[in-house]
Amino acid sequence: MSKPEPEPLVVVDVGNRHVKFAQLVVSDLTSRSSDLSVLRYPSESAVCQRLERWLPSEPVAWCVASVCRPVEAALANWVAERRPADRYSRLTNDMLPIEVRVEQPERVGTDRLVAALAADARRTAGQAAIVIDAGSAITVDLVSADGAFEGGAIVPGFAMMATALAQQTDQLPLIEPIDWLQAPPVVGKSTEQAIRSGLFWSHVGAVRELVGRISNELDHTPELFVAGGDAETIAEFLEPAAQVVPHLVFQGMLIAYRSRKCRK
């Protein structure tokens, strides 16, 4: 008899700037992770006392998607040392139940693929979907009408572009990524306002252009799904109307875990 899986399931999205943790119940087939309480840390402090207090005392299963190998390795070592009864699994692309139609499937960010997996589960049968994940980087990816990941585009996110602008110029200040939910005036009346306008509207324009050009290559109007910390900001300006799914990556990870492809 196989060993029963521990519950709850701890899903972890390891990004370049932040790590997000959430607890799901594997046996709850209705769980879609839409109302999760998420623990979020800067990547350099992902393993800390608050995480230890947040975790249940009983053994748990871990399902981890990572685009930052050093941070994920530190987390894996911490779990092995501090919680040896836990079952730790790091998702790799070949574990995911989705066809990947790109030149090097193993090099696609796992977060992009699990988001596509979740969008595939949500989309209308026979209809393509465009998945926008607005985080540290903004990704715009296509899920075909038959459920395959077709690839997409990657754009630097708000904070990344703001940092590059400040670091590679002499006098332009670093604009903190605050109040992105408020669309700034197009014509800025100060240097800071001008930078904020440029950052905001260039991102909106880039995503809209990509969505439009991808849609033009299809024979029907695709469904749009938007995830990530800046999802609400981006979705407001998209046509057709987009579905905002804040934890799309976690939903895809839960689907992958239930498929048993990521279990040891």
Image (cartoon, rainbow, N blue to C red):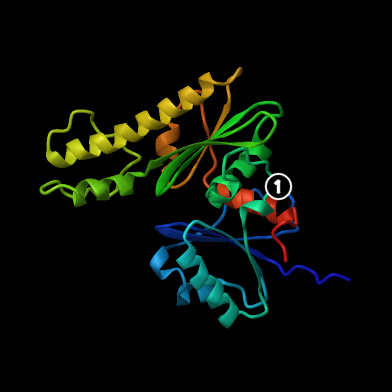
Q: Which quadrant would residue 231 be assigned to in this image?
A: top left
Q: Residues within 10 Å of mark 1 (few under 14, many from 20)?
A: some
Q: Quadrant of the C terminus?
A: bottom right
Q: Is residue 153 above or below residue 33?
A: above
Where's residue 76, x and y in %?
Answer: 56, 72
Name the residue: 23% across, 30% down: 185
- Element under label 1? loop
- The quarter of the image holding the N terminus is bottom right
Q: Is 140 on the left-hand or right-hand side of 126?
A: left
Residue at (53%, 77%) from the top-left corner? 78
Query: Which residue was labeled with disc 1?
Result: 97
Quarter residue 218 falls in: top right
Out of 171 and 248, give the one closest to the viewer.
171
* Picture layout, residue 2 above or below residue 153: below
Q: Residue furthest right?
A: 1
Residue 163 at x, y percent in the picture: 26, 50
> Where residue 239 sits in the image (x, y, percent)?
47, 23
State the residue at coordinates (18%, 36%).
194
Residue in view at x 59 percent, y 52 percent: 250
Instruction: Report if residue 20 is visible in the image.
Output: yes
Is 218 on the left-hand or right-hand side of 255?
A: left
Seen from the viewer's position, the closer of residues 165 and 85 is: 165
For residue 247, say whether it is visible. Answer: no
In this rendering, is residue 258 above or below 3?
A: above
Q: Position of residue 195 (x, y in %)?
A: 20, 39
Residue 5 is left or right of residue 186, and the answer is right
Amino acid of disc 1 = Pro
Which residue extends farthest front?
103
Q: How many marks?
A: 1
